[in-house]
């Protein structure tokens, strides 16, 4: 580097660099703008990824809860001696030898076992009843005669976590009453 000292000036002690290398203000502003756009893109990407992960976790939790609730209903209905007279397709009342009378129903968006909430965000809960010949029994409210013929119950459970138009989880199960007709 060549240095040249300026004489005859008050700033005679300042040394200037001839052929100096560096960035101009405009070049620095362009670099800062490009880096800002890159950082904004990365932040948007990570925010979207985090949001998707959280949504996935809610979906998994809802699916796990739906399966646990469905398994509990299936086990208890399978033990039933008989199904009580049901007035709606969204509820079931039955009697088991060990637990006595049990009721499952849909109250708003809550699945209830007797009066206790088992699960939230339930969109649909439908019970369909069948006799020994797989003929559907759908005369609601069920008469005592129709209720005594029930040998199989089909459950359709739909759960909607994010309140959009389609259900997130749909579970179906067919249950044969093992203890049907046994006194209890």
Image (cartoon, rainbow, N blue to C red):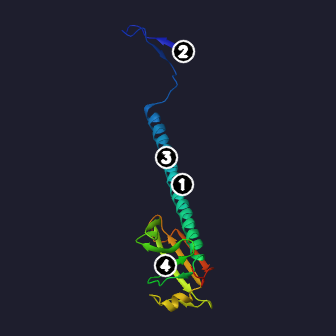
Residue 119 visible (yes or no): no
As measured in the structure, the alpha-carbon distance from the residue carrying label 3 to the one carrying label 4 is 53 Å
Q: In which quarter of the image is the C terminus?
A: bottom right
Residue 78 visible (yes or no): yes
Q: Earlier in the sequence, mark 3 or mark 4?
A: 3
Which residue position is annotated with label 3?
43
- On screen, residue 79 above or below 6: below
Q: Earlier in the sequence, mark 2 or mark 4?
A: 2
Foreground disc of the pair 2, 4: 4
As measured in the structure, the alpha-carbon distance from the residue carrying label 2 to the one carrying label 4 is 98 Å
As measured in the structure, the alpha-carbon distance from the residue carrying label 1 to the one carrying label 3 is 15 Å
Q: Which of marks 1 and 3 is nearer the N terminus?
A: 3
Residue at (45%, 66%) from the top-left corner?
A: 116
As measured in the structure, the alpha-carbon distance from the residue carrying label 2 to the one carrying label 1 is 59 Å
In this picture, residue 132 sits left or right of residue 20:
right
Q: How crowded is mark 1: few (under 14 residues within 10 Å), some or many (20 or more)?
A: few
Residue at (49%, 82%) from the top-left corner?
A: 84
Seen from the viewer's position, the closer of residues 50 and 21 is 50
Which residue position is annotated with label 2?
2
Which residue position is annotated with label 4?
93
Where residue 52 appears, as percent x and y from the top left, is: 52, 56
Foreground disc of the pair 3, 2: 3
Seen from the viewer's position, the closer of residues 83 and 36 is 83
The outermost residue toward the left is: 10
Foreground disc of the pair 3, 4: 4
Residue at (58%, 91%) from the top-left corner?
A: 135
Q: Tag 3's secondary structure?
A: helix
- For residue 115, what is the image quadrant? bottom left
- Circle on res. 53: 1
Where residue 5 appears, as percent x and y from the top left, is: 46, 10
Q: Earlier in the sequence, mark 4 or mark 1?
A: 1
Q: Quadrant of the N terminus?
A: top right
């Amino acid at each position: 580097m060549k240095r040249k000292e300026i004489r005859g000036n008050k700033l005679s002690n300042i040394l200037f660099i001839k052929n100096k290398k560096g960035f101009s203000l405009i070049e620095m502003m362009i670099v800062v703008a490009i880096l800002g756009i890159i950082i904004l893109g990365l932040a948007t990407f990570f925010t979207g990824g985090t949001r998707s992960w959280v949504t996935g976790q809610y979906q998994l939790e809802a699916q796990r809860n739906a399966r646990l609730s469905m398994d509990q209903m299936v086990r208890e209905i399978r033990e039933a001696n008989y199904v009580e007279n049901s007035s709606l397709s969204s509820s079931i009342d039955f009697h088991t030898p060990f637990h006595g009378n049990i009721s499952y129903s849909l109250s708003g968006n809550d699945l209830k076992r007797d009066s206790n909430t088992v699960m939230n965000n339930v969109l649909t809960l439908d019970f369909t009843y069948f006799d020994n010949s797989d003929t559907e029994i759908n005369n609601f409210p069920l008469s005592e005669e129709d209720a005594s013929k029930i040998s199989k119950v089909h459950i359709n459970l739909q759960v909607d976590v994010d309140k959009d138009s389609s259900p997130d989880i749909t579970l179906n199960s067919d249950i044969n009453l093992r203890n049907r007709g046994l006194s209890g």
